[in-house]
């Protein structure tokens, strides 16, 4: 099944390689030098990140991406206070990549602004400020980062032999996911992350389970797939977060071939 999923992941068009996603802030929003949009941090898991000294530009690099894959990057920005309500341009993006050794870029010219992000500043009396709601995609990414970090910390504790601490870390993460707006919104991603945490708790149920029955390997697989946002195999009963359609189809075909006697 895993072999079929891996082969399927590489099907379709030629992969993109040497991908560089560049994010640029709008710079000055007000009249003073302090009125700058600043990139405080970029969360991209396993991938290489560089932030310019002036905190106005960040670049995330991906070695390759296959057909059907996607990557999500989480930004933390510092925004200046403005005198009044209105719309403000915050950040724009561009990407450079290679296809069959041909370098491509989007947007293709300096006159095309590419993808951009804006924010609406509203008056303090606006009813939307009473119970502010964060975008679901942002909530999902926050939970993904949180769960991945929790599993890393639990693995470190388990590697040192401290399963009590490992379980405590995972229980706290479990409660955080269940109480999150993403889980309340019936998010597929939140449910999949909860499965990861529950599976982790099973892995640290005993030293035998962790050391001799695949628990440690399961931790490594979960950390890798969540950090890279990539998977070529989904265990039976688990929700697929990162597997591409072609990989899923190939894995399904492999499963059916076993039950039908086709090899």
Image (tube, helix red, strand yellow):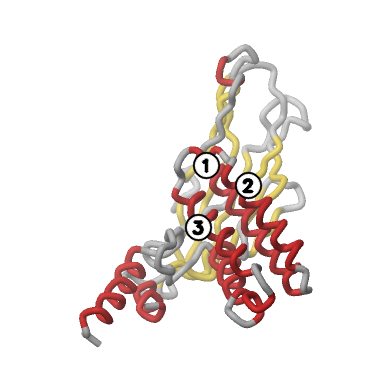
User: In the rendered image, which quarter contains the C terminus?
Assistant: bottom left
Tell me whether circle 2 and circle 1 mark residues in contact (CB < 8 Å): no
Using a 10 Å C-alpha cutoff, classify the residue at mark 2 as few (fewer than 14 neighbours), some (14 to 19) or many (20 or more): few
How far apart are labels 2 and 1 at the CA level?
A: 13 Å
Residue drawn at the location 77% of the way across and 73% of the way down: 161
Answer with mark 2 or mark 1, whichever residue precedes in sequence: 2
Helix, strand or loop under label 2: helix
How far apart are labels 1 and 3 at the CA level?
A: 19 Å
Using a 10 Å C-alpha cutoff, classify the residue at mark 3 as few (fewer than 14 neighbours), some (14 to 19) or many (20 or more): few
Answer with mark 1 or mark 3, whichever residue precedes in sequence: 3
Tell me whether circle 1 and circle 3 mark residues in contact (CB < 8 Å): no
Q: Name the residue under label 1.
A: 182
Q: Mark 3 points at which residue?
A: 71
Q: Nearer the viewer, mark 1 or mark 3?
A: 1
Say above or below: 251 vs 148: below
Q: Name the residue under label 2.
A: 175
């Amino acid at each position: 099944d895993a072999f079929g999923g891996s082969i399927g992941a590489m099907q379709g068009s030629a992969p993109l390689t040497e991908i560089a996603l560049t994010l640029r802030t709008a710079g000055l929003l007000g009249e003073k030098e302090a009125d700058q949009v600043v990139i405080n941090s970029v969360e991209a898991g396993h991938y290489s990140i560089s932030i310019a000294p002036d905190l106005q530009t960040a670049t995330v690099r991906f070695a390759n991406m296959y057909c059907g894959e996607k990557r999500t990057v989480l930004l933390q920005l510092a925004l200046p206070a403005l005198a009044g309500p209105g719309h403000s341009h915050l950040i724009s993006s561009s990407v450079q990549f290679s296809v069959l050794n041909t370098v491509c870029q989007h947007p293709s010219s300096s006159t095309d602004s590419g993808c951009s992000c804006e924010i609406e500043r509203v008056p303090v009396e606006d009813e939307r400020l009473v119970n502010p709601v964060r975008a679901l995609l942002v909530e999902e990414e926050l939970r993904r980062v949180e769960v991945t970090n929790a599993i890393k910390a639990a693995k470190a504790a388990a590697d040192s032999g401290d399963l009590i601490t490992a379980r405590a870390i995972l229980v706290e993460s479990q409660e955080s996911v269940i109480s999150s707006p993403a889980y309340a919104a019936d998010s597929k991603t939140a449910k999949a992350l909860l499965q990861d945490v529950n599976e982790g708790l099973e892995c640290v149920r005993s030293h035998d389970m962790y050391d001799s029955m695949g628990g440690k390997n399961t931790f490594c697989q979960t950390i890798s797939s969540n950090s890279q946002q990539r998977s070529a195999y989904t265990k039976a009963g688990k929700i697929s977060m990162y597997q591409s359609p072609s990989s899923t189809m190939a894995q399904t075909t492999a499963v059916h071939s076993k039950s039908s006697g086709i090899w």
